[in-house]
Amino acid sequence: MKFAVDEPVDAVEKVLGELPIPPYVTQQHIQLAMRAVLQHGPESWPAGELCRSDRTPYPCRLHRWGRAVLRTRGMTDRAVDELVAHAQQPVRVPDGRR
């Protein structure tokens, strides 16, 4: 189940609307936007794709906000998708044995 990026999809969004984009995007905004995109990614459920953090239809408002902030700094949707794919790769942790 895919939703249009600008379409409100849950009760909170219908009341509050979209999160505002800051007029001047700082490094802190970029870090928060990257965290929002990574933590509010899709998860497959029988009802369709839901946000893994708040279980609203994906993309949730924080995920959309994060993408919008990154877009204002010139990051393409493809680059964001690559960032997410890279972050989801398993990390090899040393087991401590030699």
Image (cartoon, rainbow, N blue to C red):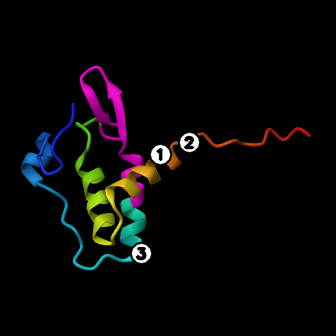
In the structure shown, which secondary structural element does the residue marked by tag 3 occupy?
A: helix
Kindly indicate whether the residue at mark 1 contacts the one at mark 2 (C-beta within 8 angstroms): yes
| Residue 23, image x, y percentages | 22, 78
Q: Which residue is mark 2?
A: 89
Residue 36 is one of the magenta-drawn residues: yes
Q: Amino acid at mark 1?
A: Ala
Residue 94 placement: quadrant = top right
Residue 85 is tagged as 1
Q: Residue furthest left?
A: 15
| Residue 88, image x, y percentages | 51, 43
Residue 27 is tagged as 3
Quadrant in which the C terminus appears: top right
| Residue 12, image x, y percentages | 14, 46
Quadrant in which the N terminus appears: top left
| Residue 5 located left or right of residue 53 | left
| Distance between the alpha carbons at the discs numbered 3 and 2 | 25 Å
In the structure shown, which secondary structural element does the residue marked by tag 1 occupy?
A: helix
For the magenta stretch, what is the residue range? 34-54
| Distance between the alpha carbons at the discs numbered 2 and 1 | 7 Å
Q: Amino acid at mark 2?
A: Gln
Q: Is residue 76 above or below residue 29?
A: above
| Residue 81 located left or right of residue 58 | right
In the structure shown, which secondary structural element does the residue marked by tag 2 occupy?
A: loop
Q: Nearer the viewer, residue 10 or 76?
A: 76
| Residue 9, image x, y percentages | 14, 41
Q: Is residue 48 above or below residue 33?
A: above
Q: Nearer the viewer, residue 72 or 63?
A: 72
Disc 3 residue crowd, few under 14, some 14–19, many 20+, Cα 10 Å: few
Q: Residue furthest bottom?
A: 24
Disc 1 residue crowd, few under 14, some 14–19, many 20+, Cα 10 Å: few
